[in-house]
Amino acid sequence: SQYSDWITRVGAYLIDVAPLIGLWIVLYILEIVVGSTIFAILLDLIGFAGSIGWTVYNRWIMGGQGQSLGKKQLGIRLVSEDTGQPIGTLNAFIRDIAHIVDGIICDIGYLFPLWDPKRQTLADKIMKTVVVPA
């Protein structure tokens, strides 16, 4: 198929969030071990900053160039439906905001690639993007 299947997209997303999950698990364990409220607040701030930094770098900068870490690992690419070219950092950011629409009704928009001819989520339709084999 000229479009990436749903399960590959899900796998790429799981790879993308794995570093964040690992970060939060480590911080949570440190909070338990140390037991200090001030230290816990500091660790939460570090976790928040790390999460924002990773999202900006991986989803918006790298994703805007076509491949987040997960997409690169699984051999898929995010591109403009019209040009076939990467969408850029700003449009990758806006696409993430558009994913709110995917989640509005019980996350049904995330399931659209299961039956959509171009395997697009609602956010992909809004942004005119497709995910294709790299």
Image (tube, rainbow, N blue to C red):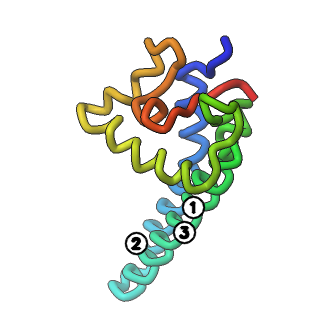
Classify mark 2: helix, strand or loop.
helix
Marks 3 and 1, how far apart at CA: 10 Å
The percent coordinates of residue 103 (x first, y second) are 31, 38
Callout 3 environment at 10 Å: few (<14), some (14 to 19), or many (20+)? some
Q: Amino acid at mark 3?
A: Gly
Q: Tell me if 87 is positioned left or right of 119 in this view.
A: right
Residue 32 disc label = 2
Residue at the front extreme of this rendering: 82
Q: Are marks 2 and 3 in contact (CB under 8 Å)?
A: no
- Secondary structure under the numbered disc 1 in the rendered image: helix
Q: Which residue is mark 3?
A: 50
For the point 53% across and 56% down, the residue is 20
Task: Decide: is 80 above or below 6.
Answer: below
In the drawing, does residue 131 fall left or right of residue 111? right
First in sequence: mark 3 vs mark 1 = 3
Circle 1 is placed at which residue position?
A: 56
Tag 3–tag 1 contact (CB < 8 Å)? no
Q: CA distance from mark 2 to mark 3?
A: 19 Å
Find residue 85 and report its horizontal and vertical position in percent.
71, 37
Q: Amino acid at mark 1?
A: Val
Mark 3 against mark 1, which lies toward the viewer?
Answer: 1
The image quarter containing residue 130 is top right
Q: Earlier in the sequence, mark 2 or mark 3?
A: 2
Q: Nearer the viewer, mark 2 or mark 3?
A: 3
